[in-house]
Image: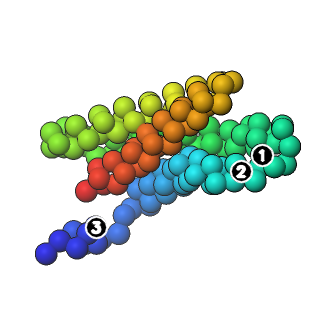
């Protein structure tokens, strides 16, 4: 009976793997989790004044964009660590779909941050968030 990750492991991860995966998960926590925290705070932030949403968004960008680039860097590191030549075709397909989601998340966030029309901002915030969550879930699937 397969009960998850622990059932297949006989040893702990080595220190390099711990650092690589910890950085990736921490960056995902900031990038993905931060989007949902910011969305949840937005009604309150709007009550703080007309410039408050932009100020909060700019402050968040100073944290989230470095996290995004850590995700990209550790993503390449993760890919190199899994020996892709031995991966199954289904793993490769899921990996490619994840990469599309990562690109959509980044592009969605950029367009959202540059848009001026509220409707456009909302649409691209949704694209960025949904693509980010999809990339996260697909990353969990890739872990086996």
Which label belongs to residue 5?
A: 3
Contact flag, marks 3 and 1 (Cβ < 8 Å): no
Give the class, few, some or many, for how many residues have Cα within 10 Å of label 3's Cα (few <14, many ≥20). few
Which label belongs to residue 2?
A: none
Give the class, few, some or many, for how many residues have Cα within 10 Å of label 2's Cα (few <14, many ≥20). few
Q: Position of residue 62 (x, y in %)?
A: 71, 40
Q: Is residue 59 left or right of residue 98?
A: right
Q: Helix, strand, or loop for circle 1?
A: helix
Looking at the image, can residue 73 be seen? no
Instruction: Please name the residue shown 53% across and 49% down the image.
Output: 32
Instruction: Point out the frontmost of discs 3 and 1.
Output: 1
Marks 3 and 2, Cα distance to the nearest angstrom? 39 Å
Looking at the image, can residue 126 be seen? yes
Q: Helix, strand, or loop for circle 2?
A: helix
Contact flag, marks 1 and 2 (Cβ < 8 Å): yes
Q: Along the polypeptide, which appears first: circle 3 or circle 2?
A: 3
Instruction: Please name the residue shown 22% across and 73% down the image.
Output: 3
Q: Quadrant of the C terminus?
A: bottom left
Q: Which residue is mark 2?
A: 43
Q: Is residue 109 above or below residue 137?
A: above
Marks 1 and 2, Cα distance to the nearest angstrom? 5 Å
Marks 3 and 1, Cα distance to the nearest angstrom? 43 Å
Instruction: Please name the residue shown 26% across and 69% down the image.
Output: 4
Q: Helix, strand, or loop for circle 3?
A: helix
Count of picture labels: 3
Q: Is residue 104 above or below residue 19?
A: above
Q: Is residue 114 left or right of residue 105?
A: right
Q: Position of residue 56 (x, y in %)?
A: 76, 43
Seen from the viewer's position, the closer of residues 69 and 129 is: 129
Q: Is residue 51 above or below residue 18?
A: above
Q: Quadrant of the N terminus?
A: bottom left
């Amino acid at each position: 009976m397969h009960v998850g990750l622990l059932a297949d492991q006989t040893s702990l991860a080595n220190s390099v793997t711990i650092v690589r995966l910890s950085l990736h998960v921490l960056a995902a926590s900031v990038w993905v989790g931060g989007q949902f925290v910011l969305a949840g705070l937005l009604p309150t932030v709007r009550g703080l004044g007309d410039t408050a949403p932009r100020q909060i968004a700019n402050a968040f960008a100073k944290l989230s964009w470095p996290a995004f680039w850590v995700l990209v860097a550790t993503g390449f590191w993760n890919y190199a660590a899994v020996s892709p030549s031995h991966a199954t075709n289904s793993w490769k397909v899921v990996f490619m779909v994840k990469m599309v989601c990562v690109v959509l998340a980044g592009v969605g966030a950029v367009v959202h941050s540059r848009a001026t029309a509220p409707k456009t901002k909302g649409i691209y915030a949704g694209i960025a968030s949904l693509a980010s969550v999809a990339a996260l879930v697909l990353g969990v699937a890739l872990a086996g």
